[in-house]
Image: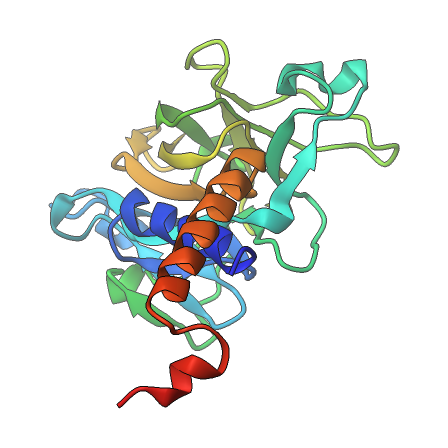
Amino acid sequence: MIRLLPILLLAGFLATSAPAAELLTTQHVDLAVNFQPTLVGTATNPWRLTARDEDTRREFGGQRAGIGDALQVILRAGLDAQFPIPDDADYSFLGTPGAPVWVLPQTQESGIPFLGVSTENKTAQSWSAFNVDSPLLARGIASGTFASNQVTLRLETFSGPGNFFVWSTDSFGTPLPRFFDTSNGLSAADGRPFTPANHSHFNWAFTAPGIYELGLRASGTLTAGAQFSQSELTTFRFEVIPEPGSAALLLAGLASLALRRRLTRRGLRGRDRFALR
């Protein structure tokens, strides 16, 4: 019972932390930037930012009815994603060495979502759409559509109980400059250019458990007419799960003791519980 109660407490945390939604917990997931040139100049925004579950070929999100969110899917950083902050000056931005941080790493690890950013066109594959207009499904960015052959993905809004960082590491494990960093507020610096048919993975870090909402917007200057174009602001939700700590274990132990005493008073311990009439 002592082992079970921390799990029940954790389940209670999850039940109250966010509304029901599709959970992506261990899959290969890409935040996809999609653009349909034939919709330029129409009443429909040609952009869609979506979450692609690459393992099951499902795509979520896409500003249906102008809502501009992908909250029907939640990416979860669970217990396997919790690491101690390294005692290394290169990682001092994360906080105090030894303190917990939750990281969706740049390289794929079992039990943790493998999260990237994609501008790839995957319309040749079979995808299932969840709140995604079919002309935009897995379309990505076509080469030559944008000036300098690039689009920019920016973090424009943020809410959460801790800080959020995204960066990549070089071949020696040294972190490269962060392109999303909420510790000093949001600015034009919280963005990164991407080229067509690009598929990249990064380290996504959260410094406290709870619910995070990230508002992302893609933009670029069209080659035809040099017209600036941008997506609707699209919100993605992440759920960070804490490991049961000593306080939770103590509470679980006290609850277990109280329950055991109640069962003893009612004669329901051991074989007695099978003697009910």
Q: Does 68 appear above or below 175?
A: below
State the quadrant of the C terminus: bottom left
Which of the two residues, 146 or 79, is positioned nearer the viewer here?
Answer: 79
Which of the two residues, 207 or 232, is positioned nearer the viewer here?
Answer: 207
Left or right of 112 in this view: 37: left
Identify the colour scheme used: rainbow
Q: Does 150 appear above or below 164?
A: below
Which of the two residues, 179 or 16, is positioned nearer the viewer here?
Answer: 16
Q: Is residue 148 visible?
A: yes
Q: Residue at x 57, y 37 (%)?
A: 245
Q: Can residue 141 be seen in this view?
A: no
Relative image position of residue 44 (x, y in whole percent) = 16, 48
Relative image position of residue 54 (x, y in whole percent) = 52, 65
Q: Residue at x 48, y 20 (%)?
A: 190
Relative image position of residue 129 (x, y in whole percent) = 31, 68
Left or right of 22 in this view: 246: right
Q: Which residue is drawn at 81% across and 26% down?
A: 174
Quarter-wise, where is residue 267 in the image? bottom left
Q: Residue furthest right?
A: 172
Which of the two residues, 275 or 93, is positioned nearer the viewer here?
Answer: 275
Left or right of 235 in this view: 79: right
Q: Which residue is drawn at 27% across and 60% down?
A: 132
Q: How many marks?
A: 0
Q: Does 188 appear above or below 37?
A: above
Relative image position of residue 47 (x, y in whole percent) = 30, 45
